[in-house]
Every structure is written in structure tokens, then in C-alpha cells.
Image (cartoon, coloured by chain):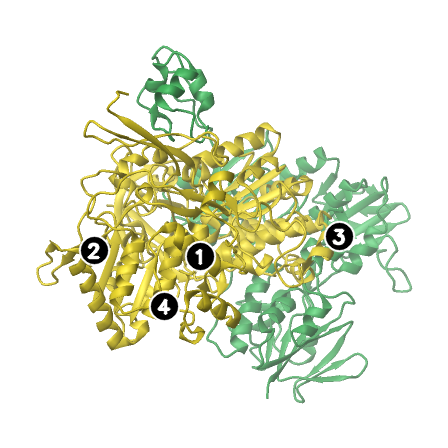
Amino acid sequence: MPERVVVVGGGMAAVRLSEHLAGDERFVVTVLADEAHPPYNRILLSAVLEGTHPADALTLRSVQWYADHGIELRLGARVLEVDRDAREVVLVDGERVAFDRLVLACGSIPTLPPIRGLVRRDGSLDPRVHPFRSLADCRRLAAEVVPGRRAVVVGGGLLGLQVARALAVRGLRTEVVEGADHLLASHVGPGAGGVLARDLRRLGTEVYTGSRAVRLTDDGLRLDNGYVLPCDLVVLTAGGRPSTALARRAGLMVRRGVVVDHTLTSVTDDRVHAIGDCAEHRRRTTGFVPPAWEQAEVLARVLGGEEASYDGHRSVARLRATGLDVAVLGDPERAEGEVVEVANPVAGSHRRLVVHGGRIVAAALVGDLSRVGLITQLYDRGTLLGPDEPGQLLLPEVADAAAPLPDEAEVCACAGVTAGEIRACGSVGECVDRTRATTGCGGCADVVRRLVGATPTPVAVG
Amino acid sequence: MTETQTETRTETHCPYCSLQCGMRLSARSGGGRRTPEVSAWPEFPVNRGALCRKGWAAAGLYGGRERLTSPLVRDRETGEWSAVSWDAALDRVASGIRAARARGGPDGVAVFGGGGLTNEKAYALGKFARVALGTSQIDYNGRWCMSSAASAGIRAFGLDRGLPFPLADVEEADVLVLVGSNLAETMPPAARHLDRLRERGGRLVVVDPRRTPTADRADLHLQPVPGTDLALALGVLHLLVAAGAVDTAYVSERTTGWEEVRDSVASWWPERVERVTGIDAHEVRALAAMLGEGRKVMVLTARGAEQHSTGTDTVLAWINVTLALGMVGRRGAGYGCLTGQGNGQGGREHGQKADQLPGYRRIDDPASRAHVAAVWGVDPESLPGPGRSAYELLDALGTADGPSALLVLGSNPVVSAPRATHVTARLEALDLLVVCDVVMSETAALADVVLPVTQWAEETGTMTNLEGRVVLRQRALTPPRGVRSDLEVLAGLADRLGCTASFPTEPEEVFAELGRASAGGPADYSAITYDRIRDEQGVFWGGERLFAESFAHPDGRARMHAVEHRGPAEQPCADYPVHLTTGRVLAQYQSGAQTRRVRALPDDGPFVELHPFLAARLGVSAGEPVRVATRRGEMSAPARVVPTIRPDTVFVPFHWVGANRLTNDALDPASRMPEFKACAASVTRA
């Protein structure tokens, strides 16, 4: 008898798990997705808002794919509760779905910041207010995008900056409000945050840091410093918390997230697992895709009876926002180690590596992403560096200096001809006849033209 | 020229790479000396008279002191070689084969061929294995060349021809992407097409972990972590989908499988690609934007993309990009593979590959077996089935289930096989190793019997270049006394083994038989003759340009396959922290058995190329010896410190013993290609 695996949630962790279990005859998989759209790539929602991606390019797998791989995908399936004794989940319409293994992949839910006036007396949101978590949220906001309108983005974190840039690119007059004293405060220090704020202002987006929105009125959004920002749209990007209500009601141990061990199994019930944003492992929850995928992969192996364990992860956060360059590796504000930093606020860059035991354990690159790919590799792989390397990594790449070409230097590799032999020729034609230089790949033709007939003193090339 | 001298000029082709540059070879006779000389053949369209120094120096292959001119037999007790007569040598080989067959049955004897053999030899070798030996155990070093592109081409298009168009077509592209090719050094005359492409306003993209002379010519050079080209292709396709650049009419009319491929790239956004490939996300975007704008986009892959345990999938991922853009079959656009070896193309079409019969037929297809058996005059039932792939064959030598005798033609696996120390041990475990070669190669040095054979311009034969153009290498020089052609060796052995099938030794006669055997197959040579090749400066099998109207699958459509990034089988770790990749240098070719012996070619030996960051970390200066070690072996060579390589990667050329002691024998599941181009290594001061 195959095991019945029921996955609660249809986000990126759930799809990844489905992909790993697809075609495995030991399992019958049911995915209960509460959204109406088949699972999609959530992290590109701001790209849809900005207009670089159409919404349908985000679909991770077609509905047909799930069917073809024997996975039951139920869209719009809201789970009311988990009956652990009966090993069933109960949907809002009363239907009960039996499981042998339950996987909670419920993600996180946006929290409403304490701003009066967001919710109207009848309990509905003010029509100007937009959360930004789901494709439906994104579509609803995109429908309001009209150039010239005024938008205030509440929250100066990664998502807030992406949304702010997307709206600005689409022609909205956009402002950002951040309660902390600088942008991206949970990832970078004040210097880097300041660079970002200047970049945003340069791109036409005003930034209010160290100020909280307190009230939404007909005049606009009022801040605690007394400013009132007139607005047609308020986008809430600050605050999300793991979705744990189901787990809590089911009596599973929950702190910030559903507490799991290294096999991603609930510490309360070994038939229940949690992955992604809703899971808490070693007292940490994450809000990123790569760890969620890694957890999905580990869990798939655990379900298949393999010895597999999740040992935490290295996080890399990249801002996807036109005109803003940000990469955050690990936790550069709190990681233990020596800090190597190169800042040039004049040019708008701030680059910090945190090095511990010769290894990059965290980094924040703002305003200049040179070598970001390499730095990420060294960080991900824990490469042991020499003492000068971190500094060299942060310095600009120097173009090859124009070196004089000595007579013995080989100019034409195809024919094996040196600079001296070419200088000794009176013309390109003579050079071709005598040395065959330029007759192979042709790459040296420019240099040969410059060298022919030249006095045998070194000349600069390059 | 004096009256007592005569000079003959023969049109022929370079002895080395898959470009098969046309050249004229003059052999002067008279005065007691013969000095062959290479001159240009400007009318030949592939290279238009251009040659690299290997080609110009090709005559240096002739007349060297190291040339073998007598069969040699090695005494296993003393290790001493003695010259014997051809009869004695062939008798010895035949009796060894009979002994191995008596112990292990027909599969107790194996054959290992090469991608440098002419079509005639490749064909005769396949026939010899299946008919005279009755063994399934035949494969060749071409498996280590372009087999990943071959298996991807067959899956996607239903047909594998390296370039489905003439090489000169690359000049017509708006954007040309070279993935893992350093053609400016590996086939220099081909680089002239890149210059003309750019003169026309086309743009060149090179994807390579090293900034090579080819990359120096590029408008955009992307430097991925070795083994991550597949992820780059997925990321590019992701952005093309997002930008609406997909040719939906083409995709719906000419392909199948698009929907799953489209969905599979939804999770490959540029920043994820950056994390996997080490290529900055903005460069991924720049490449996708270039491809999206190009009216004619061409992607060519070479060994850098293909020699991986994920090589087939990597090629499929790039093919998907070209199919999604509607480029395949359009002139000046599409996908192609830059085959490496001289007859890499023809060598894989006529039956020296474990799963094939002549004409690129499958050996497990009953109709193909019947057709070929009829040409050979044997019972189809007598033909063996598919055998082991190249590396698996070598790995099995001298084991309980494996062959105990091996015949090697045109290959030097002691230098060229992955995990070479292990392969050498397998060769040493054989009861009989027979090597046909022109010099005492590292592999020949292990043999029991070495048979001296003719080479290159001493014999006539056809080669099929990287474009699928069949060209004729005409005999221009007299072979030294004492050597025989490979065809004569096979005929002599077949005769001694009591085989009644015929083994003609005249190349043109063999070619005619090859034509009949290939007739009706995917690579059908039946309409090609030596005269036509001479008249038409080479003849394309299948036509000059393929896929304009339809693909070779029964439904006429190309197939798109959803593929996933897996990465190299071996990842860097604490003990082996850097990536190792391997490749060629301009002045040497393959295992170096030929070029290392040509005096006009510089031979500075192997080196270890590394970035100044890594050199500083190790405290190594240029020229100092460094030791490179992997889980399989180690080597030492001088450091070459260059800023053009990724700081997390080292490069070692493979023309000398050493590099392949390090390389990984992990195989691609479809093509059985070993992972030459990426493994984990440690680098230290030697």
C-alpha cells in the first residue's frame, strides 16, 4: 500500500516536494493549495508588477503535469483543521482527507501593521490598502497602476524596495516608509542603508526612515513625525509571520514556526512534517526560497526512507529591483568575524565581507555588485581564503596594463611568430610571405599592422 | 627546380582536427632526398588557404626517427622489444585472439578505435569486430569527443550531424553563442569566420570559465563555474519566455514538448542562475536580451559544454533555446556542435561505436541488421548486439566478465582516458594488447604486439568534417618500407582467423562497400564517390543544410526535452577545494603522440593555469611547480599565473600524461561521456 502524503499549501516548497516525489510509486500525493492559481514562482511577483514578466510565466508546473505524475492538486482547498487522532485533515467544506504523512507547507501570512484606518468599520480593508503576498494581491495592485498616481510602500525591506521600484518604473509617484533608522535594516548597516536611500531618491523615490505610519486618513498616510503623505495606494510589505494556526490548533509544538527536527519532522508527532516559511528548525525560521527547496529535498529523501538531515543553510538574498544593486549573504550585521569593508558613498557603493577563520561567512554588497557571482561561490562553498584575498575581492578589477611588447613575445600563435620577426618585415605582405603571421586565425592582424616596419623598441599594445 | 627533380602537388587535408583544412602537399623527388612541403589550397571553402602552425608543420610527421617500421613483440618477462616479420606478428596476434576467445567467448576480445581514423578504416574496423571477431565489445575514443552532442541531437532532431550547415554560415548570424569552445586555439582558421561575423555587425558571445583568445574576440564573455552551462541555458530561456521572445508559431508547428519545458524554466530567475553559475545576474540578462533581439541566433557547443556527466542535458537545454526562438532550420541560425577530432563525425557513423552499424544505424534494429548483414554476406543472427561504451569497455578489461584481449587503432588511452592510472592498470591486466600506431605511443609501450601502420598522407581515405562534408585525403607520400595500412592489417588478421567475409584493402573499394552498407540509413553515403568529392570540394551527406522543412523524427517535429541542472558529479569540498578543468593548447593535438614529435611545434610540457588570487593564496609564483591532486591521482607542473581564469578554477592541458590521471570517470547516463571538464582538486606548492 502506498503511503498517502498530504501537503497543506501550494507554494514553492510544496511544488519542490511534489517534484521530488513525482512518479514514486511508494506515495500517493495530494496537494491542498488554498490559492486558485496553480502553484507559481512567488518571488517574481514584483517582476509581474514591474511588467518584466507576464503572470503566466510564473507557473511552475501545469495542472496537467500534476495529473500526469499521479499527484492530486486541489486548488482553492482551504484546510480548517488537522485531526491527528484520525489522521485526517478537514477542509472548510467539511470534507475529510486521510493521510499517512502530513506535510505542512503553509508559508507565511502578511501581518497588518498597527496603522489605524487600514481596516474600515465593517472589517474590510480600505480600498487603497494592498498587501503583497499572493498572485491575487499582485493582480489587484497591478490593476491600480496608473502613471501619476501616488503610492506609499510601508516597509523598507527587500520586498518593499522591490515593490517600490516596480511601481516607480511603472510611473507612479512612490514613497517608502521604514520604521527602522535605515533601509534594509535587518540585513545591512546604516552606511549601506544610507547608500540605498540616496539611490532611491536619485531615482525619484522619497524615503522616510525612522518613522512609522500611524494612521490612514482621507488626506493620506500620517507618520509619527507628523508628515502626511497623500496617496492613492498603500502597499503593505512589512511583516509576515509563519502560518502556524493549523499546527497550533492541532496541538503541535509551535514557537515562531512549527518546530521540527533535522529530519523536518514535528517534535510532537512523527507523522507530521513542516517545510518552508512555516517551519522552525534550530530556533530559526526563514523567508527565502533556497532553504525551503533544500528542506523539500531533504524531506523527500526522509519520506523515502533515506538517512537525510537538514543542517541549516546558507542564505543569499538578492534584490530584484531595476536600478538598485543589493546582495546579502548570510547575516552580515550579526555574523561573528572580522569585517573587511570598502565604502564609497560618493560613488554610491558599500561592500562588506565578514570573514571568520579565513572563510567568508557573510557579506553585504550594495551599489556595486562586481564579483558577486564569485563571492557567492566562495561563501556557499566555504572556501578557505588567503589573508589578502577578501580585500582584493572588494577592490575594483584593474584592466590589464598596456605592456610593452618585447621582441621575443609571440604575436602570432598560429604560426609561432614573435614581435621581433614581425618588426623586421617591411610590410604586412612581406610579413605574411616570410612568417605566415595573420594567416591562421587572423587574430593578430591588428598588432601585426602596428608592428610591421617599426623600430625594434618596445611599443604598447592592448 | 632542376631538370632532374620532379615535383608533385597533391590536394589533401590536414592530419588533425575536425576542420580538415584543405592543403596542398608537394613531394619532391630526385637528388636522393624527399622533403614534403605544405602549401595553401586557397580554393578549398572551409579554410580558404588558412592553416594553423600544426597544419603548416604537418610534414614534420614524415620521416621522423621515431617512426616505427617493423612489427615489434614485447617479452613480458624482460620487457624487451624485438622486431619480427609481419607474418610472425600477425600469427602471434591471431593465436592470442583465439586463446582469448576460447576463454571468454567472442566478447573475450575487444576493439578500441579512434575518431581520427578514415571512414574506410572506421567502417572496416566495425565490420572486422562484428564479423571476423564476432564481438560486441567495440567502441572508440570519439565517445569522449562529441557523444553528448550526438545523443542530444538524435533526441531533439532525430539526427546527429555536428553542424547541420556549412561552417561559413556562422558569418550570417546576428548573434553567435559559443558554449565551451575555444576555436581560436583549437581550430584557428575557423576563427576567421568570427571576425567576418563581427565585421558584418553580428555579435559574438563566448561562455567559458577561461577568457581564451576566442573569448577575447567576444562582445560578451560569460565565465561560469565549470559544469553549470545547463543552468545558464535554463536562465536564458526563462528570460526569453518572460520577454515574450518565444516564436510561438514555430514552436507549435515544428516542435513538441514545449509546455513542460516552459514550465520547467519558471524557477530559473537570473539571481538563482547567478548563485549556481557564478555569472552575475546582469550578464545573464544581457545575454537573454541579445538573443531576444537577434533575428538570427546561432548556438554552437563544444567540449566545454559536452564533456560532463550532464553533457547531453546541457546540449538539450541549449537546443531548447534555439528551438524556442524558432531558429533551427533557418539559414545563418540554429544549433550546431563543433566536433573535435579529425573524423569525429564520420567515425561515429560507420560502425565503430558500440551500438551502431554503418550509416548511423542502430545495431538493435532488426531491419538495420538485415540490411548490413546482406551487404556483408552473413546471417543477421550472427551479428552481436550492443557492447560497452568506451570507458566502460576499458574499465572491464582483464576483469572476470571483461575482455582479455584488446586491439587498439588510432588511440592512445593511457594519455587520453579519464582516470588514466586506473585505465593503465586495466590495460596491463590484459592477456594480449595489440596496438597499431605510427610511433611508440604511451599505450603502444604497454602492448604485447605493436604493428607499424601508414599515416595521413601516406594513404588515401575519406574524412567527414565537422560540417558533415565528406572530404578526400589523397595519398601524397610514399610510406616507409615495412609499414602496412590498417586495412591490410585487418585483412591479414581476418584471413588468419578463418573469416570468409571479404576485407578489401583498396580504400576506394572499401568506400564503395561502405556506401552500400550505409544506403538508406540516417547517414547515407551511397551517392558519394571519390570523383564527386574531388569535383565538388567535398560532399555533404544529407545535403548542405538540414532541417529547413522538417526534422528527422517520424512526425517531422523537433522534440523539446525538459532538463534539470544537476551539476558535476564531484563538487569541491574542504579537501579538494577548487574546480579542475582540462583542454587543449594551440600547438599540440589530442594525446600529443603526433604533435609532440614534430620538431617545428613548441612543446613546453604541461602547466597548471591559475588565477593570481589563488596563486597568492598558495604562495606560488609563475613558473614554480605546483601539485594538483584529485581523488584519482596527482601531477606536478609549473604554474602559469593568469588573470583570465576564474579564481576558483585551475586548468591543465591534456596533451601529456598527467591531466587525465586527475579527471573524473563519472559518465553521462545517455551518452556515456566521462566528466573530463569538471572535478574537485587540491592545489599546493610542489
Asked whether the residues under marks 4 and 2 belong to the same chain, the reply is yes
Asked whether the residues under marks 1 and 3 belong to the same chain, the reply is yes
| Disc 3, SS | helix
The residue located at (37%, 67%) in the rendering is B130
Q: CA distance from mark 3 to mark 2?
A: 59 Å
The x and y percentages for residue A99 are 65, 84
Q: Colour of chain B?
A: yellow
- Mark 2 — residue? B450
Asked whether, in this view, residue B97 is left or right of residue A278, the answer is left
Q: Residues within 10 Å of mark 3 (few under 14, many from 20)?
A: few
- Mark 1 — residue? B514
The residue lying toward the viewer, choosing from B230 and A263, is B230
Q: Quadrant of residue B353?
A: bottom left
Of circles 4 and 2, the one toward us is: 4
Ranked by sequence position, the earlier of labels 1 and 3 is: 3
Q: Quadrant of residue B82?
A: bottom left
